[in-house]
């Protein structure tokens, strides 16, 4: 129903200015919604030369899809993204993996059992589509769920970390093509279920992070063969991930509210040994991911409602000190659930 604008000539000038500002804001939001609808209805166009790299999106229950990376257009940081994995409301997206179609995908359960399958065995799917079960051929035990998913990138070691802060290094050969399905990586009585894992070069710096924004940094060579306590975690907190880079590198940190930062390691001093309490790495009480990045990386973020955004890591200011972060993804009644970073051609 159309309505005529009433006569506002008798209204005080400050009140009139406020009304006009509200009208302008409503019009801007209307135009923005129309623009977003147009972009989402348009067909997805390649954003980089065709590549064999894929974005693998996985739900909490293990439903997954594989989509060529070049079909995801870059947005500016703080965009709303596009709809990606079409999953049930009670099974939100929980994992993101960037992998070449020739690579292997390693899955680790809450009981620290590892499985491996070929990325190419996942059928290629459009950007917005449903997934298929990753674990259909790997029967799980009662109360066992997917905890980690990462690609075989050919590093020297994998460094898994548990929710209570235990860390170890596992030689890459143990997770290769000869991996026996269901192999146990460690005893979950020592530190609980897996919380994160990253590939290392053998002489990297590890940064372990917790939900409440605490972190600890130390050299990976300080981790003994049988593993050790990497970080002492408060009872009301838990580890959410681990990332590895060199002493001059940066780690992208993302909170559930869509804010993120690149924390430079020169501004976060290393501990002489693992096993102590952490210190603030980012101002948040809902950290959800950490990944090593540099200016030649792209960042992929997915939300609880299945929205995906891709943008250049160079758009996130790199900081040596503690910050709250900048807005990386605009959310509406939504939360970020997973992040992945990867080097890409500069267009």
Image (cartoon, helix red, strand yellow):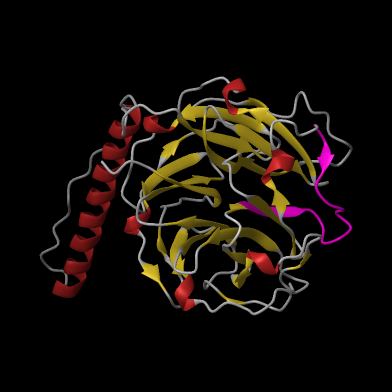
**Split into 4 quadrants, where in the image is the N terminus?**
top left
**In magenta segment, residue 95:** no
Out of 54 and 94, give the one closest to the viewer. 54
Give the image location of residue 332, x and y in percent. 46, 50
Q: Quadrant of residue 39?
A: top left
Give the image location of residue 68, x and y in percent. 44, 28
Residue range (magenta): 181-198
Q: Is residue 7 above or below residue 94?
A: below
Q: Is residue 72 above or below residue 259?
A: above
Which secondary structure type mostly characterizes the magenta part of the structure? loop
Out of 179 and 316, give the one closest to the viewer. 179
Q: How many marks?
A: 0
Residue furthest toward the left? 9
In this orientation, does residue 278 appear? yes
Q: Residue at x 68, y 40 (%)?
A: 60
Left of 3 or right of it: where is 295?
A: right
Left of 6 or right of it: where is 165?
A: right
Q: Is residue 120 above or below residue 260?
A: above
Q: Quadrant of residue 78?
A: bottom left
Give the image location of residue 29, x and y in percent. 28, 49
Left of 197 or right of it: where is 162?
A: right
In this orientation, does residue 210 appear? no
Give the image location of residue 339, x and y in percent. 52, 49
**In magenta segment, residue 188:** yes
**Split into 4 quadrants, where in the image is the C terminus?**
top left
Q: Residue at x 44, y 78 (%)?
A: 321
């Amino acid at each position: 129903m159309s309505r005529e604008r009433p006569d506002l000539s008798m209204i005080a000038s400050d009140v009139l200015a406020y009304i006009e500002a509200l009208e302008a804001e409503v019009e801007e939001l209307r135009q923005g919604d129309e623009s977003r609808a147009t972009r989402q209805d348009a067909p997805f166009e390649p954003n980089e030369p065709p590549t064999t790299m894929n974005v693998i999106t996985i739900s909490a229950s293990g439903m997954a899809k594989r989509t060529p990376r070049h079909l995801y257009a870059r947005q500016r940081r703080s965009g709303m993204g596009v709809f990606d994995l079409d999953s049930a409301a009670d099974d939100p997206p929980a994992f993101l993996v960037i992998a070449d179609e020739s690579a292997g995908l390693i899955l680790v359960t809450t009981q620290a059992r590892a499985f491996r399958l070929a990325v190419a065995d996942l059928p290629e799917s459009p950007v917005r589509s449903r997934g298929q079960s990753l674990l259909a051929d790997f029967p799980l035990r009662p109360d066992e769920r997917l905890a980690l998913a990462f690609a075989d990138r050919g590093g020297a070691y994998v460094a898994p970390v548990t929710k209570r802060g235990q860390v170890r290094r596992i030689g890459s050969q143990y997770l290769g093509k000869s991996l026996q399905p269901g192999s146990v990586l460690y005893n979950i009585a020592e530190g609980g279920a897996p919380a994160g894992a990253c590939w290392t070069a053998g002489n990297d710096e590890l940064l372990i992070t917790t939900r409440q924004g605490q972190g600890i940094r130390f050299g990976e060579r300080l981790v003994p063969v049988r593993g050790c306590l990497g970080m002492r975690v408060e009872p009301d907190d838990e580890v959410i991930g681990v990332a590895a880079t060199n002493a001059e590198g940066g780690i992208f940190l993302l909170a559930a509210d869509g804010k993120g930062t690149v924390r430079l390691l020169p501004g976060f001093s290393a501990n002489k040994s693992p096993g102590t309490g952490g210190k603030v790495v980012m101002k948040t009480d809902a950290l959800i991911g950490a990944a090593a990045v540099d200016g030649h990386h792209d960042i992929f973020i997915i939300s609880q409602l299945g929205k995906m955004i891709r943008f250049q890591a160079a758009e996130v200011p790199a900081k040596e000190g503690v910050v709250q972060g900048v807005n990386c993804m605009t959310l509406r009644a939504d939360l970020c659930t997973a992040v992945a970073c990867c080097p890409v051609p500069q267009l």
